[in-house]
Image: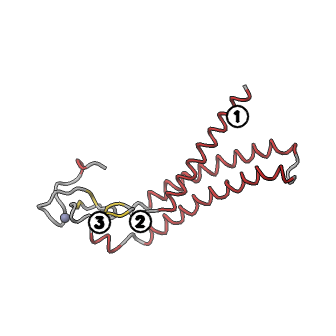
């Protein structure tokens, strides 16, 4: 968002230049009217009204889904590391198990990144903290998996 696309003046104070637009109703507001919050800048009306129930619920559900993806793959990988030494998985099954876990990891982290992104988009009026956490956690995990995949293919050569 650039200030160039904003109308010249605040909706409440025609004499004051708008510095930002409200993150909920998108009306142009001046610096006196803007309430700063972790979720963005809001006009006085929207700061009092808060995000709509639908926006909050949608962002929350997607945030939960995103964090759940990370949680599942975290526990799956923890199992993958611990199971062989605990004798739960026979030696011959370790390689196919890791192939399956890696595929699961890519699938779930991609899903986690996607739900996190959509959740953030939905919740941009309401913060969507959980979706942001899910997005970052899955994004980092996806990068880590890609790194391992690249290192693994280098080692074979
Ligand atoms: Zn507003
Ligand atoms: Zn104003």
Q: Which residue is mark 3?
A: 35
Spatial CA distance of label 2 from label 1 is 41 Å
Outermost front residue: 85
Q: Position of residue 20 (x, y in %)?
A: 26, 57
157 left or right of 63 in image: right
Q: Position of residue 65 (x, y in %)?
A: 58, 61
Q: Position of residue 97 (x, y in %)?
A: 79, 46
* N-terminal label among 3 and 1: 3
Q: How many marks?
A: 3
Image quadrant holding the C terminus, namely: top right
Q: Which mark is residue 126?
A: 2
Spatial CA distance of label 2 from label 3 is 13 Å
Q: Position of residue 98 (x, y in %)?
A: 76, 44
Look at 66% across and 38% down and name the residue there. Answer: 148
**Distance from mark 2 CB to nearest ligand 1 atom below 8 Å:** no
**Distance from mark 1 CB to nearest ligand 1 atom below 8 Å:** no
40 left or right of 144 in image: left
64 left or right of 128 in image: right
Q: Which mark is residue 152?
A: 1
Q: Quadrant of residue 124?
A: bottom left
Q: Secondary structure at mark 2?
A: loop
* Ligand 1 quarter of the rendering: bottom left
Outermost left residue: 15
Of residue 91 and residue 126, the one placed in the foreground of this image is: 91
Look at 23% across and 47% down and name the residue there. Answer: 4
Q: Secondary structure at mark 1?
A: helix
């Amino acid at each position: 968002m650039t200030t160039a696309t904003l109308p010249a003046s605040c909706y409440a104070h025609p004499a004051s230049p708008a510095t930002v637009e409200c993150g909920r109703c998108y009306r142009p507001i001046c610096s006196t009217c803007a309430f700063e919050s972790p979720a963005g800048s809001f006009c006085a009306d929207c700061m009092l009204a808060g995000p709509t129930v639908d926006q909050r619920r949608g962002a929350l559900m997607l945030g939960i889904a995103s964090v759940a993806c990370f949680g599942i793959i975290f526990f799956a990988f923890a199992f993958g590391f611990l199971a062989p030494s605990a004798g739960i998985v026979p030696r011959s099954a370790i390689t196919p198990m890791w192939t399956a876990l890696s595929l699961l990891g890519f699938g779930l982290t991609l899903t986690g990144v996607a739900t996190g992104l959509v959740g953030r988009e939905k919740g941009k009026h309401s913060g969507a903290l959980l979706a942001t956490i899910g997005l970052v956690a899955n994004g980092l995990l996806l990068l880590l998996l890609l790194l391992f995949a690249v290192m693994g293919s280098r080692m074979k050569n």
